[in-house]
């Protein structure tokens, strides 16, 4: 028995992870879903999310969320950190692709009527995931702390502030005061790297569990 087999055996006899994984992964998908690329859009969005988490952890190791250091730390990532420019670009493009994939996935669900009974709740979870995906983009936009980031955040928080009744409270919560500054930056950073990834992960477990329990919807 090789060392790898021994490790495998040690883990298996204690956790039986292989049985659990086999039952989850070895579930046959219907033929019409396997051959139609439209059914891959949710998976594409998920792949983008995984890439974003991986590259995001790397970026968070070098990024400094303060108005004085943020721009410089991004410049440092781009020019000094080995492969920093490549990883930041992958993060950027995966973010754009995730938004496109989620939108197209939602259109596939809508036009194929896959949201109908018994999948209404999964549609609601999906809409929340769509909102979260766009909030990911919005909160990430501020982080480089350049002119584009500053003014986009000013406009975005201004729009949130114009919501009737709740607007001023939402704006205060996001901005952390009357002007965009250090408070806004730490809030956006916390939302971008903690609140949203954690909420997305929880909702995705729910989303996938419902797909498995309810099965993938049939052909039109
Ligand atoms: C982070 C975003 C999302 C990810 C990673 C994701 C992932 C997935 C995956 C992998 C599937 C199974 C395969 C497929 O049909 O593509 C699926 C199914 C489904 N998704 Fe999503 N999804 C996301 C967002 C959404 C959105 C925005 C909606 C709608 C508002 C939605 C509604 C549904 C529904 C109703 C199903 C069941 C489809 C069926 O049974 O045919 N999802 N999702």
Image (cartoon, grey):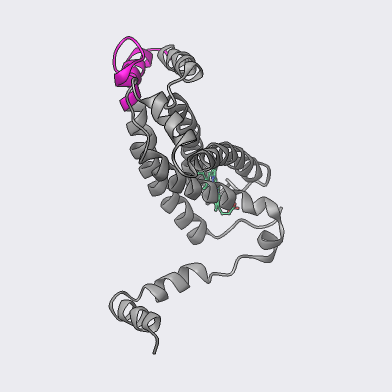
> What residue do we see at 60% from left, 42% from top?
101
Q: Is 89 rendered above or below residue 138?
A: below
Q: Position of residue 64 (x, y in %)?
A: 34, 31
Query: What residue occupies the far front of the structure in this picture?
Result: 80
Relative depth, front residue between 9 and 36:
9
Q: Is residue 169 left or right of residue 123?
A: left
Q: Position of residue 139 (x, y in %)?
A: 43, 28
Query: What residue occupies the far top of the structure in this picture?
Result: 178
Look at the image and say whether residue 167 sits in the magenta stretch. Answer: yes
> What residue do we see at 71% from left, 52% from top?
220
Look at the image and say whether residue 107 sits in the magenta stretch. Answer: no
Relative depth, front residue between 33 and 44:
44
> What residue do we see at 44% from left, 40% from top?
81
Q: Is residue 126 left or right of residue 182?
A: right
Q: Is 143 rendered above or below residue 147?
A: below
> What residue do we see at 47% from left, 67% from top?
24
Q: Position of residue 74 (x, y in %)?
A: 43, 30
Q: Is residue 204 left or right of residue 191?
A: right
Q: Position of residue 196 (x, y in %)?
A: 39, 38
Write down the region rendered in magenta. 163-186
Q: Is 16 rendered above or below residue 73?
A: below
Q: Is residue 159 left or right of residue 178?
A: right
């Amino acid at each position: 028995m090789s060392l790898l087999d021994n490790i495998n055996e040690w883990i298996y006899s204690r956790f039986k992870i292989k049985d659990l994984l086999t039952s989850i992964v070895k579930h046959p998908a219907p033929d019409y879903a396997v051959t139609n690329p439209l059914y891959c859009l949710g998976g594409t969005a998920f792949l983008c999310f995984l890439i974003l988490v991986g590259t995001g952890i790397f970026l968070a190791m070098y990024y400094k969320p303060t108005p004085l250091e943020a721009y410089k730390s991004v410049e440092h990532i781009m020019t000094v950190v080995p492969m920093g420019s490549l990883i930041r670009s992958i993060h950027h493009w995966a973010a754009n692709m995730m938004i496109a994939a989620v939108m197209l996935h939602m259109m596939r669900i809508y036009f194929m009527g896959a949201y109908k009974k018994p999948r209404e709740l999964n549609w609601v979870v999906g809409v929340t995931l769509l909102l979260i995906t766009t909030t990911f983009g919005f909160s990430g936009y501020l982080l480089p702390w350049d002119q584009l980031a500053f003014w986009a955040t000013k406009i975005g928080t201004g729009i949130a502030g114009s919501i009737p009744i709740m607007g001023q409270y939402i704006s205060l919560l996001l901005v952390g005061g009357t002007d965009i500054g250090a408070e806004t930056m730490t809030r956006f950073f916390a939302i971008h790297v903690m609140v949203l990834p954690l909420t997305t992960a929880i909702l995705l477990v729910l989303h996938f569990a419902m797909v498995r329990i309810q099965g993938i919807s049939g052909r039109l």
